[in-house]
Image (cartoon, helix red, strand yellow):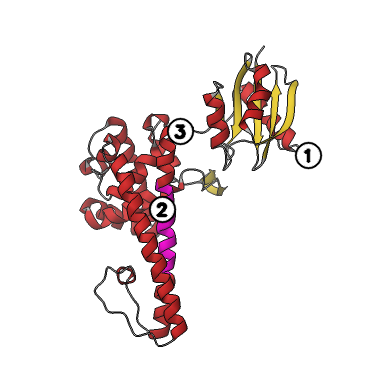
Amino acid sequence: MGLYCGIDLHSNNHMLMVIDDADRRVYERRLPNDLAITKAALEPYRAELVAVAVESTFNWYWLVDGLMEAGYAVRLVNTAAVRQYEGLKHSDDEHDAFWLAHLMRLGILPTGYIYPKGERGLRDLARQRMRLVQHRSSLITSVQNQVWRSTAVRLRSETIKGQGKHPWPQISDPDLAVSVKAGRAAIDTLTVQIERLEKLILKRVGASTQFRMLKTVSGIGPILAMTIALEVGEIGRFAGVGEFASYCRCVDSKRLSNGKKKGEANRKCGNRYLAWAFMEAAHFAIRNLPAAKRFYERKRRQRHAMLAVKALAHKLARACFYVLRAQVPFAPERLFM
């Protein structure tokens, strides 16, 4: 007899459910988020346990890593793809945990990729760098607007970051001057941390074949190559180029019936960091690769400019899939035939 475990994970507790081949509930209990307690609860069923299904919530690392290190087979549930029975009138944590175990027993549980623990920290460090860059950008815009509306002088972002040669306008309001000074100090601090993280990450990633191959793609420099390499991980986890492009959010999410649009699917299903990276790569490619610019101009005549950029991002994502899978340099003549 095989047993199946489903875990409905929350911020401070989780509902653990074990069922058998006939969907009989063998064990169910709400447990605190303590790995030792969870392992003790599963230990009596270890020999017969086929696998443990864990929800992909914001805090799954500790549980999935701990159970895998303890020797359990773990399935990370793709919560966006799990469909509940639509006739349900009532649902709770016990039912949710049971449903995960039930779907796994039937072999139809949608699962996600468990990024290797040893590499996950570096990827998350790159994400932290991106958050700092976004925070710095918002501060730069704030300082720029404060100076602009008070002096009618629009400063370039390079000037605000201390990289430009343009002089600062005279600020007569003492309170505004203090506010701008505080903003610039925060920007300087963030710049130091961003550069430190970039140096550390590039030192770790720079020697990889993935990084070197991605840098051959037009529009992709060191930062974008670093981001894409870390977010993609093992390229072999994607069955084909279509699945990869979908994961990068580079495909349409609309639903069609009889040639008519009937709605949209989940547009946010996929990796937002890769979506950003390929859109950025498309903008750079338009400026640096004549064939990419011609493709963009042709698409722009047919549709909105942003959709034209996204179409180019889609082509670059597909190119990167083949570059990473075959470990060969980018060939623009094959992309824009």
The residue where tag 3 is placed is 117
What residue range appears in magenta? Answer: 126-141
111 to the left or right of 123:
right
Mark-to-mark CA distance, 2 and 1: 41 Å
In the rendered structure, which amino acid carries the disc numbered 2? Met
| Quarter of the figure with the C terminus | top left
Point out the residue furthest to the front here: 36
Residue 143 position, x and y percent, is: 41, 73
Q: Which of the two discs, 3 and 1, labels the residue nearer the N terminus?
A: 1
What's the mark number on residue 90? Answer: 1
The image shows residue 301 at horizontal and vertical percentages of 34, 59
Task: Where is residue 43? Give x, y as percent.
Answer: 65, 19
Name the residue nearer the viewer: 298 or 246: 246
Badge 1, how many Cα within 10 Å: few under 14, some, many 20+?
A: few
Counting residues from the N terminus, which is met first, the one under dot 2 or under dot 1? 1
Q: Specify which label sits upstream in the sequence, 3 or 2.
A: 3
Q: Which amino acid type is shown beneath numbered disc 3?
A: Lys
SS type, badge 1: loop
Can residue 243 be found in the magenta stretch?
no
Residue 333 placement: quadrant: top left
